[in-house]
Structure formats: structure tokens, C-alpha cells
Amino acid sequence: MLLWREDISTCTLEEMLGLKDENRAWGKELRVKNIALVNSRLANAITQADYREDRKVGHEAAAEWQRRTNLIDAQLVANQKLMIFR
């Protein structure tokens, strides 16, 4: 999981776009790990219990990824609105 600062309202546009890129890369990494996990289970390389536990962790990470995506997008929209009204 990436290091994350909760208050992104003070970030510059360049920093926001960097956060968006990092988050996008993290999301891709999560999807690749999920595919590998499913393939491991299908190949019976891991137990059902291990699979369930790893899926739980994966769902939590995906929820955090989505939360960060929403925050970044909302802040970018807010910044655009500020630029329009200046």
C-alpha cells in the first residue's frame, strides 16, 4: 500500500496528477495480485482458507484504492472549479 497523506487539499496540480498516477499503478498491481491469487486457487496451490483470507485482504485494499481514487477525483474537480471562478 502506498504512503498516503489524508489532506490532499493543499497539493498542487502536479502533485495531484502524480498521486493519481501512483494510485492507478497501485490499482493495476492489486488486479494482477488478484488474478495470481485466483489462478493459485484454481491450481489448488493454496487452501480454501488461505484463499478466503487473501481475498479479504484484497477486498480491503481495493476499497482503500477506491476511496483514494474518489478523493483524488473530487479534489481535482474542486480545483478546476476554483480555476474557472478566478
Image: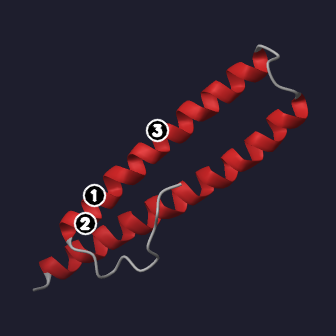
Q: Between marks 1 and 3, how big is the CA–CA gap?
A: 15 Å
Taking 22 as reference, is 83 above or below it? Answer: below
Left or right of 18 in this view: 39: right
User: Which residue is under mark 2?
Assistant: 15
Look at 55% across and 41% down and name the residue there.
30
* Kind of residue sitting beneath label 2: Glu
Identify the residue at horizontal 54%, vertical 31% (top origin): 32
Q: Earlier in the sequence, mark 1 or mark 3?
A: 1
Q: Which of the labelled discs sits on residue 51, or is there none? A: none
Say which amino acid is labelled 1. Answer: Gly
Toward the viewer: 80 or 16? Answer: 16
Quadrant (top left, top right, bottom left, bottom right) of the C terminus: bottom left
As measured in the structure, the alpha-carbon distance from the residue carrying label 2 to the one carrying label 1 is 5 Å
Q: Please give the label number shown on residue 28.
A: 3
Query: Position of 82 compared to 70: left or right?
Result: left
Residue contact between numbered discs 2 and 1, judged by CB atoms under 8 Å: yes
**Residue 78 screen position, x and y as percent:** 29, 76
- Residue matched to label 1: 18
